[in-house]
Amino acid sequence: GNHSVVNDYQRQMSYLGTVRGRIGYAFDRVLVYGTGGFAYGHVSATQSIFAGNDANALIWGGNGSGLRTGYVAGGGIEYALPTSSVLNPFNAEAVTLGVEYLHYDLGTSSFDLVGGLGAPYYFTDRVKTDGNIVRGALNYILDFGSPATPVVAKY
């Protein structure tokens, strides 16, 4: 007969956070920087292996979840636009366009798949959580330290 099994595996990261420092070099309107630090996130995983027959009974199953910690590292580039740019409608002190790449690694965790149906042994799942993020940014940098300047509306 047909003795296949059905494997259902799900993994989810409900949030990812980072606490990073940044160091770089600025020349003219360009800033090139490296960034890195601490990363954390909540990871959960579930795996169920079913008998692929009419009964579809659970042979092994298990799950694990928790807060995972690790590192994040990457770099980026920012370009400061002229204050007369159309992308600076608020006449902010500086407007920057940027792109950033980050690699995060929250390490490897494990959980057991316990046997059902009197299965005499179990498996251990090892779950590695890492990934890459590329993001773009449009930053408005406002200077609240300078004395207020009167706003003159010209019609």
Image (cartoon, helix red, strand yellow):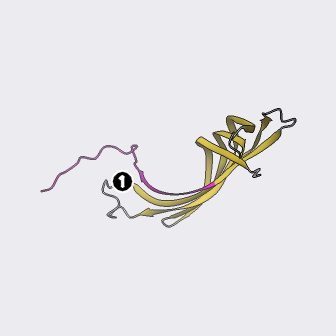
In front of the other: 68 or 114: 114
Nearer-the-camera pick, 100 or 58: 58
Q: Residue at x 50, y 67 (%)?
A: 28
The correct choice, above or below, for 132 with respect to 19 in the image is below
- Vertical comparison of 136 with 128: above or below: below
Tell whether 18 sits left or right of 6. Answer: left
Asked whether residue 64 is in view, the answer is yes
Magenta residues, start to end: 132-155
Q: Residue at x 24, y 46 (%)?
A: 150
Residue 60 part of the magenta-drawn span: no
Asked whether 136 falls inside the magenta stretch, the response is: yes
Q: Position of residue 91 (x, y in %)?
A: 32, 55
Residue beneath the point at 68% across and 35% down: 65
Assign the C terminus to one quadrant of the image: bottom left
Residue 152 x/y as whole percent: 19, 51
Q: Nearer the viewer, residue 126 or 38?
A: 126
Residue to which mark 1 is pinned: 92
Q: Position of residue 44 (x, y in %)?
A: 66, 38
